[in-house]
Image (spheres, rainbow, N blue to C red):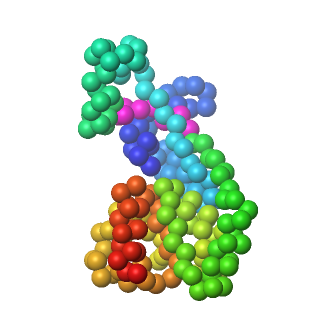
Amino acid sequence: DSVVARCTDLRLPDGSTVRMDQRARKEIQEAYSAMGKSALRCIALASKPSRGLGALASYDGSESHRAARQLKAPERFGDIESGLTFLGLVGIRDPPRDTVGPAIARCRAAGVRVIMITGDSKETAQAVARDVGVFSPGDPVEAWTFVGKEFFALPEAQQAGLLKSGNLVFCRAEPADKQRLVRMLGKLG
């Protein structure tokens, strides 16, 4: 998602480069979504011409190089990671271990709720959750899947209610989101 938003150009199959337009962005988003729904982890590939890299174009890895300061300032990464040329999408199938599905089935049979927390996209997380049995056919998957920041934007009472309910999936979760969820679950008992 974020890589495509930082692209201003698009590399075509013939090797030529054109300006990125809304139609191309929509096609890329549709392809990304379709790959995610097939339980593929999606990686967007982009490049930046060396003429747009400034001091980074000649960076040699040394601490004394003037570009070293840029790389130590995460708040400036947006400047570096802008004006990119979109190259393509790669889908990677990272299947769960064979034991995951049966373990989740045993949990469900014993009345144990399953909460899946992942950094994957929403589409990929939902597809994997279906594949391993976190959700049953007919479950309201959309209502029980949350992007980390969206969940934390809900009122606290609603968050607590959801955490006490059925199986849940949290996606695009940052490490801090995971820690916060574990603390919240601990307080709920």
Look at 40% across and 18% down and name the residue there. Answer: 61
Look at 61% across and 65% down and name the residue there. Answer: 127
Q: Is residue 84 left or right of residue 97?
A: left
> Quick one: quadrant of the C terminus?
bottom left
* 5 inside magenta stretch: no
User: Compared to 58, does 75 lie above or below?
Assistant: below
Q: Is residue 174 left or right of residue 128?
A: left
Residue 87 in the image, given as x and y percentages of width and height: 53, 34
User: Compared to 155, does 77 lie above or below?
Assistant: above
- Which residue is nearer to you in this view: 17 or 100? 100
Q: Is residue 163 left or right of residue 43?
A: left
Instruction: Tell me if residue 134 can be seen.
Output: yes
- Which residue is nearer to you in this view: 78 or 177? 177
User: Compared to 17, does 123 lie above or below?
Assistant: below
Instruction: Tell me if residue 8 can be seen.
Output: no
Q: What's drawn in magenta, residue-wise?
A: 81-88
Look at 57% across and 82% down and name the residue there. Answer: 112
Residue 13 in the image, given as x and y percentages of width and height: 61, 31
Numbered circles on residues, count: 0
- Overall secondary structure of the magenta section: strand
Residue 19 in the image, given as x and y percentages of width and height: 43, 33
When asked about the image quadrant of residue 34, the answer is bottom right
Q: Is residue 49 left or right of residue 133?
A: left
When asked about the image quadrant of residue 123, the answer is bottom right
- Which residue is nearer to you in this view: 92 or 86? 92
Residue 31 in the image, given as x and y percentages of width and height: 57, 51
Look at 58% across and 51% down and name the residue there. Answer: 41
